Image (cartoon, rainbow, N blue to C red):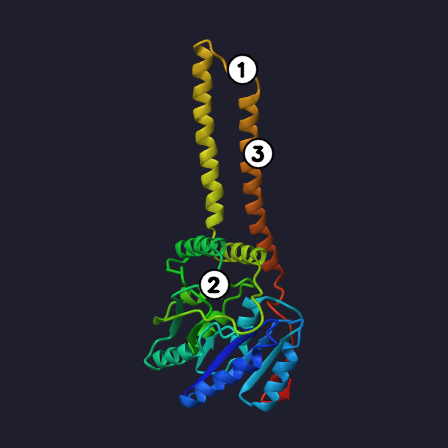
Amino acid sequence: MSRLSVVLPAYNEELMTAKVCRTLKEILDHEGISYELVLVDDGSSDGTWNQIEQISEQDPNVTAVHFSRNFGKEAAIVAGLAQASGDAVAVMDCDLQHPPETLVKMFRLWEQGYEVVEGIKTNRGKESLLHRKSAGFFYGIMSRATGFDMQNASDFKLLDRKAVESVLSMPERSMFFRATSSWIGYRSTSVLFEVQEREAGESKWSARSLISYAFRNIVAFTTLPLQFVTAGAVGCFICSLILLVYSLVRYFTGHAVEGYTTLLIVLLFIGSAVMMSLGIIGYYIARIYEEVKKRPRYIVSKIIHGGKKK
């Protein structure tokens, strides 16, 4: 019988871990799907790990992974994929905003021969206008970079075993899983789902962390910002040519440009463009530096499988 692994990254989800495991167990048992749950505690500061330990001791189908500190959601997803042993592996949030019933639809599609099943949002839940517009801008850039429509993409997806191995074979330290699962190819399809309201706890994403997450993943997955530097340089050159022609015309007609206002504006404009360009290039160099060090994506302090600690 085929087995489904469900990877559940958890960060400060003390109030939700027991419920998500109980809900998944009820649904998957009812559907007759053989399963394992892989819970990855991403260095939580509350009682999340204690809850996961208790669950893993009571249910042999639960594998628990504990990080030495917080390494981020992408690292937790990769760690879960590495520990999962199922023929198909699904990734979903631990807060039940990804509806578990949709997981069954994904598994049935996998049984029909699809190797990557993407969860596509029909709504974004309760988000501010700024958050919604920022997300649209970010996914617009990622769609151009990947060649796939990522406007409503999510981490909620199911991968065949060989697709999982393809993801794990990628050596980069900074991985954007949401785009990588599309980039690897394979026979794919999608299912629609509505983002559910969080039942307990609160979102771990602040505006600052979302901006950092977006920019980090854009740089990790595409060189498009470097093309902005080139476009900016071309724009500055064109503006300087126009200003040069304007200044020469004024000079030869006896109306030379007076004062330093124009010169100051030009210097400030070019200086700002240069500093912004250097900032983008510097960020790429920093990411290259992180990759060259070849530090592990994460450090696991504990693993509990079948009630036994490793």
Q: In the rendered structure, which amino acid carries the disc numbered 1?
A: Glu
Residue shown at 51%/16% (left/top)?
257
Identity of the residue drawn at 56% across and 17% down: 259
- 176 on left or right of 70: left
**Residue 108 location, quadrant:** bottom left
Q: Which of the two residues, 30 or 236, is positioned nearer the viewer here? A: 30
Under circle 2, the secondary element is: loop
Residue beneath disc 1: 258
Spatial CA distance of label 3 from label 2 is 41 Å
Q: Position of residue 258 (x, y in %)?
A: 54, 15
Q: Which residue is mark 3?
A: 271
Q: Secondary structure at mark 3?
A: helix
Q: Quadrant of residue 70?
A: bottom right
Question: Mark 1 against mark 2, which lies toward the viewer?
Answer: 2
Q: Toward the viewer: 157 or 288?
A: 157
Residue under label 2, please give it: 126
Q: Amino acid at mark 3?
A: Gly
* Residue 177 point in image, percent of width and height: 48, 66
